């Protein structure tokens, strides 16, 4: 199985969301998560490619040309500094199944608020990829409790995502 990992945003051109107190940047947290996830999936015997790039057209084209089976986009949410939690976004039928496995692994692994898996038809990477695609909003970077989850327990979150992927594949 081929898994394409897309840490969201871009470390040069688009930081994504930023914590207003500490300055922690979404692009850096998801880059770290992407690297960890690639390692766990490779250890599990899966083929992995990772691309973090400002151009979502390029990201989608690379995934499609490679013939990815699964496409995993990693993000941190931001809203009003009070909202918390984890949600996994999907568009397709199989995307919904994959999102369900990933979401349930994460909420069982760390003390996060379960915001569920959600249908979205307005996201570039879900619309532009041929693979079974999901976008994981791991936690809210602008909320201090969620930020500490992202900084202290990122490895647990990523291991949970990896287990969700292998759950999907073996289901
Ligand atoms: Zn993002």
Image: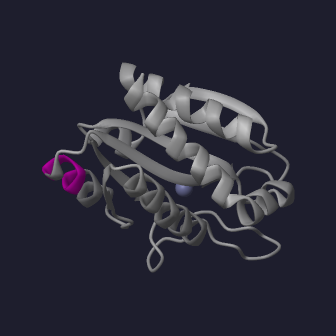
- The quadrant where ligand 1 appears is bottom right
User: Magenta residues: mostly which secondary structure?
Assistant: helix
**In the rendered view, does 54 fall on the left or right side of 159?**
left
Asked whether residue 63 is drawn in magenta, I would say: yes
Give x and y (percent) for residue 51. Answer: 34, 64
Asked whether residue 158 is drawn in magenta, I would say: no
Q: Is residue 58 above or below residue 130?
A: below
Residue sitting at 31 percent across and 63 percent down?
A: 55
Question: Most extreme residue toward the bottom, as rendered?
Answer: 12
Residue 92 visible, this angle: no
Give x and y (percent) for residue 42. Answer: 37, 56
Give x and y (percent) for residue 128. Answer: 27, 42
Task: Give the quarter of the image for residue 169.
Answer: top left
Q: Is residue 133 above or below residue 36?
A: above
Question: How was the colour assigned to the protein in this rendering?
Answer: one colour
For the image, the number of numbered tags is: 0
**In the rendered view, does 132 fall on the left or right side of 104?**
left
Q: Is residue 155 above or below residue 114?
A: below
Quadrant of the snapshot with the C terminus: top left
Quadrant of the snapshot with the N terminus: top left
Magenta stretch in the rendered image? 61-65
Residue sitting at 48 percent across and 43 percent down?
A: 135
Question: Most extreme residue toward the left, as rendered?
Answer: 65
Give x and y (percent) for residue 134. Answer: 44, 38
**In the rendered view, does 152 fall on the left or right side of 34?**
right
């Amino acid at each position: 199985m081929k898994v394409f990992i897309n840490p969201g945003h871009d470390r040069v051109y688009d930081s994504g969301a930023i914590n207003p107190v500490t300055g922690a940047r979404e692009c850096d947290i998801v880059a770290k998560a992407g690297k960890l996830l690639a390692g766990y999936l490779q250890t599990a015997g899966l083929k992995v490619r990772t691309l973090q790039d400002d151009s979502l057209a390029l990201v989608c084209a690379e995934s499609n040309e490679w013939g990815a089976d699964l496409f995993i986009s990693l993000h941190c949410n931001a809203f009003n500094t009070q909202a918390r939690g984890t949600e996994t976004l999907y568009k397709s039928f199989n995307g919904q199944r994959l999102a369900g496995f990933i979401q349930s692994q994460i909420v069982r692994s760390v003390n996060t608020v379960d915001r569920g898996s959600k249908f979205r038809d307005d996201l570039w990477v879900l619309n532009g990829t041929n693979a079974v695609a999901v976008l994981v909003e791991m936690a809210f970077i602008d909320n201090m409790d969620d930020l500490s989850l992202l900084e202290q327990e990122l490895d647990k979150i990523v291991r949970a995502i990896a287990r969700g992927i292998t759950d999907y594949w073996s289901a």
